[in-house]
Amino acid sequence: MSESVRLIVNAYVQLRDRQAIEQLREHRRLLREKLQAIAGGDFDPSRSLRLIDSDLSEIDAGLARLQ
């Protein structure tokens, strides 16, 4: 996961801004879908997909901390 996503999620958790975290999650989800759609041929998105999955895990953990 990128350190920037961790810092952003932590800031949103401190602000108790669930909507911002959910928007961040939706953005990462759409990026993942787009990467999967263009995969194939000479383009291997596996590294990017792993990073996005890691970001999504951190985002989900942030949402869980708001519970």
Image (cartoon, rainbow, N blue to C red):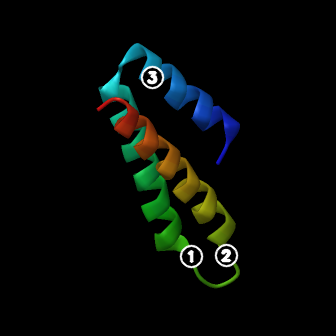
Q: CA distance from mark 3 to mark 2?
A: 32 Å
Which quarter shows the C terminus?
Answer: top left
Looking at the image, residue 47 lies above or below residue 56: below
10 Å neighbourhood of mark 2: few (<14), some, or many (≥20)?
few
Q: CA distance from mark 2 to mark 1?
A: 6 Å
Q: Residue 36 location, x and y as percent?
A: 49, 71
Give the mark toward the camera: 3 or 1: 3
The structure residue drawn at horizontal position 46% and vertical position 72%, both measured from the top left corner, is 37
Query: What mark, if any, has residue 44 been given in the picture?
Result: 2
Mark toward the start of the polypeptide (3 vs 1): 3
Query: What mark, if any, has residue 39 been given in the picture?
Result: 1
The structure residue drawn at horizontal position 32% and vertical position 27%, both measured from the top left corner, is 18
Query: What mark, if any, has residue 10 been given in the picture?
Result: none
Q: Is residue 7 left or right of residue 21?
A: right
Looking at the image, residue 32 lies above or below residue 61: below
Please identify the quarter of the rendering in which residue 46 is found: bottom right
Q: Secondary structure at mark 1?
A: loop
Q: Secondary structure at mark 2?
A: loop
Q: Residue 5 location, x and y as percent?
A: 59, 36
Looking at the image, residue 18 lies above or below residue 5: above
Residue at mark 3? 12
10 Å neighbourhood of mark 1: few (<14), some, or many (≥20)?
few
The structure residue drawn at horizontal position 64% and vertical position 48%, both measured from the top left corner, is 1
